[in-house]
Every structure is written in structure tokens, then in C-alpha cells.
Amino acid sequence: MNAKNQTVKQPRCPSCGEGILKPKTLHECFNHEEDGRTMPVVVQNVPVEICTRCGEKFHGPEAARLHHQAICKTFGFLTPEQIRSVREDNGLTQEEFARLTGIGQATISRWERGRLVQNRAMDNYLRLLKANRANVRLLKNLQGITKELGDGSQQQHRYLD
């Protein structure tokens, strides 16, 4: 088969079924509410596809990631990468971090993948854990998590009895 006979199938619009989706890069501004405040969020260089017939605009995963990053920046929240580093810097899996913090594992996963923006209280909680590893040790002590000693035995830690 030669190159002349091969045609590139262009994506059709799922809304109207007639137009072709053409890629375009846009600057977008939208209002977003957090903490009872609505603020404008500006996102630069958002990749979209626009239907040539009906004008419908479609956002993909990269656009969603850029929107999430812009929301975090606008409201001063930790980004998904920063949240992941809080956990990883303490040598914890998502499951271990969930047990330690009392935050659901699915929620942590959504935060780290940029599928969900944490609220202000959770952002503050994560920042306390990021700022000082002693806060992580304190949580472990409060929960009585054991620590393996050099001689192979384990010692149970309790902060308050």
C-alpha cells in the first residue's frame, strides 16, 4: 500500500457528528470557588480541539492538568507533585500515608493525580507534615506505630498515655 492510498482519518465531533476536530492552543479564564471565595483563574497555552461545524470545544487530560495547576497557584494550594513529595520524602506508600494521616487512600491518589483539589484544612495539614518531619513522627507516636530497633526488636512509641 502506498502513501497516496493511506488517508489520515480526522476525528469527528462527538456533539454534532459532522464537524472535524481541529487542535488549537488557547488562553482561558474561568471563575473557581474555594474557601467560600470565587476568584478568576487564568490558564495559559491550553491544548483543545474545536469542532469546525458547531464550535464545540473539547479539553483533554493535559488541559485538565493545566487547569488544576492554575487553581492550585491561584488559591495557594500545594500542587499534586508537592503532595506526592510530602509522602515520598517520608518514605511512605499511599496506603501507609493514608493510615498515618487518617486521609482516605483514594483521596490521596486523587490529589496526587490532579483529579481533586484538596480543601484549605487538608492543605494546611499537608504543609505541617512537609515543613517538619517531627510532625510525621508525632503522628506515628500518637498512633503507637512501632519502630524496629537495631537489635531486631521493636519498640512501641506513644506520645501521650
Image: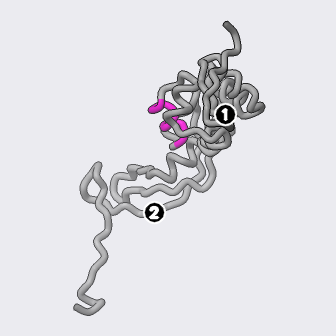
Q: CA distance from mark 2 to mark 1?
A: 58 Å
- Looking at the image, residue 87 sits to the left or right of residue 50; the answer is right
State the image coordinates of residue 101 (x, y, percent, origin top left). Answer: 58, 24
The residue identified by callout 1 is: 149
In this view, the residue farthest toward the bottom is 2
Look at the image and give the residue range highlighted in magenta: 105-112
Rendered residue at 32%/68% (across/down): 10
Residue 88 is situated, as x and y percent measured from the top left of the image, at 62, 43
Q: Is 23 or 105 nearer to us in this picture?
A: 105
For mark 2, give the secondary structure: strand
- At label 1, counting other C-alpha atoms closer than 10 Å, the crowd grade (few under 14, some 14-19, many 20 or more) is few
In this orientation, which residue lies closer to the viewer: 20 or 74? Answer: 74
Q: Amino acid at mark 2?
A: Pro
Q: Is-magenta flag for residue 32?
A: no
Q: Are marks 2 and 1 in contact (CB under 8 Å)?
A: no
Of circles 2 and 1, the one toward us is 1
Indicate the quadrant where residue 129 lies: top right
What amino acid is labelled 1 in the image?
Leu
Look at mark 2 in the image and give the residue it sits on.
23
The answer to whether residue 3 is above or below residue 151 is below
**For the C terminus, which image quadrant?**
top right
> Secondary structure of the magenta portion, mostly?
helix
For mark 1, give the secondary structure. Answer: loop
Quarter occupied by the N terminus: bottom left
Q: Is any part of residue 77 visible from this angle?
A: yes
Residue 133, how many percent across, how many down?
74, 32
